[in-house]
Structures are given as C-alpha cells and as structure tokens.
Amino acid sequence: MTAEDKLSLITRNLVEVITEAELKEKLESGQRLRGYIGYEPSGLVHIGHLIWMNKVKDLVEAGIHFIVLEATWHAMINDKLGGDIDLIRKAAWLMREVMRSVGIDVDRVEFVDAERLASDKDYWALVIKVMKMTSLARMRRALTIMGRSIDEAELDTSKLIYPAMQVSDIIYLDLDLALGGLDQRKAHVLQREVAERMGRKKVIALHTPILTGLSGGKRMEGAEKDEEVAAFKMSKSKASDAIFV
C-alpha cells in the first residue's frame, strides 16, 4: 500500500485531521506509525461506538501499530459505573468482545489498561509536568472532553487532573496519531501545545463525527457548543436516547 493509499484510508469519513500535511509527511517517511484511541469502559456499547471502531479497522489495515487504551482510572475519576473499578474492568472486557464481533482483528491491536500507566511513577511525574505547563483556566476549559461542564470542577477537584492525564497518556505511549470524536479536540490540541513546549512529539489528531442521541440536538455556537455537546451526543447513560448493540 502506497503512502497515498494509506492517507486516503486513514482520513476517509473523518471530519477533521490536525494536520493532514503532517500526516502525509509521516506516511511518506516510511516509518510505522503508532496510533491510539482512549475510551472509558463504562457500560453497554451503543452504535455511536461503531464510528470509531470502523476507523480502527481502517488504521490497522493501513499498517498502523494501534493501541486501545482502556481508560479505567479515567472512568473512575469521571464517576462511571459509580466509580466501581471492578465493574469498569468488566465493561472493558465487553468492549473488547464487541470490537471482535464487528470484525476488528483484535490480535493486531494492542490493548493497554490505564492501571498499567498508573502503576508507573514516571507516568505521574509526566502528569505533574503537563499540569505545570497548563494554566488552571485552560485545564477547566478542557473538562468538556469528559462530558462535564466547567462548573463541575468546583464540586470535585479530581476532575481537573483528567485532561492532564489524557495529554500524558499520549506522550507516555509515544504516539503519532490520536483518534477520537470531535469532542476530544481540546485534549488533542492541548497535547500538541504542551508537547511542543516540552520538545516531545506533537500528536496528529484524527476526529470522527459525533452521533447525536435519538432526541436530536440544536444548533450551537462557540463556547456553548463545547459546553453542551455532551447533552446531545448518544450516550449509554441516557438509555432511552441510545441504540445498543
């Protein structure tokens, strides 16, 4: 497969690439790229997940070393499944089985449990370094990546560490590509800014569309769009609004 073929396969059905020029340059270098998606294991799987699963198949076919980060600690911080780590681990197993059932060759995918990262003191040193390079205001604005409002940080300060963890995940795993819904844009852009200041690799962001729930949504602009997108995307936490697989 040529670099041009890989570029076409990787970018098809995406709504945004940051940046396509960087992606093309890396593909033309001939090196095998490392990509990932991080997700919170938090319950049943709905058809919105199939959007990124289909893109994982494309990336694996394009020869990307692809990592699925099972963000168990992140799910616990985000109060998923009541913060019960055992239930969160079971949800991670379920997601693997669904990925297998939709045709992803799971033997060609590397699954990484976030608990593995959390057990390494170097990971936490990196998290602290990222936080020292990011203002409090910027960290609060990034809370929308976890489906939370900015004001929720006032109730639970553990939420503030979440964006720094996501940025650190990407740096720690030495990734070239980060796959996610468009709602993850703030985290990916933050990683690019912090990584540049640290002299580390800036990730190329691959953003998929977001599937709205069955009740639909409304037209949003600016900050309102960032703040309210979680209210309209399909979510397992709103069972009447989702189609489960």
Image: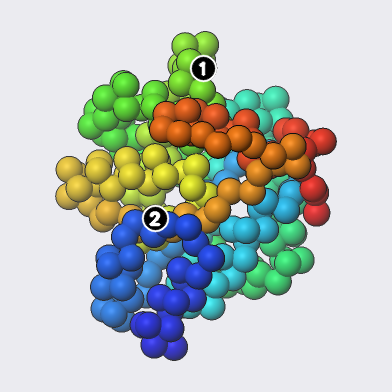
* Circle count: 2
Query: Is residue 236 something one can see in this rendering?
Result: no
Residue drawn at (64%, 48%), measured in percent from left and top? 211
Number of the label disc, if any, that sits on residue 205? 2
Looking at the picture, how far across and down is residue 129, in whole percent? Answer: 26, 34
Where 225 falls versus 26 (above or below)?
above
Extreme-bottom residue of the structure: 1
- At 42% from the left and 45% from the top, the residue drawn is 185
Quick one: quadrant of the C terminus? bottom right
Left or right: 112 with respect to 131?
A: right
Question: Identity of the amino acid at label 2?
Answer: Ala
Give the position of the N terminus as an image quadrant: bottom left
> Of residues 143 and 214, which is closer to you in this image?
214
Q: Quadrant of residue 241?
A: top right
Secondary structure found at label 1: helix
For image coordinates 17% across by 43% down, the residue present is: 197
Residue 66 left/right relative to 18 = right
The colour style of the image is rainbow
**Vertical placement of residue 99 versus 230, above or below:** below
Query: Which amino acid is tagged 1?
Result: Glu
| Of the pair 39 and 234, the residue shown nearer to us | 234
Q: Residues within 10 Å of mark 1 (few under 14, many from 20)?
A: few
Q: Position of residue 60 (x, y in %)?
A: 53, 73
Percent x, y of residue 52: 59, 58
Checking the image for residue 152, the label placed there is 1
Crowd around label 2: few <14 · some 14–19 · many ≥20 (10 Å):
many
Judging depth in this view, the residue of 49 and 158 nearest the camera is 49
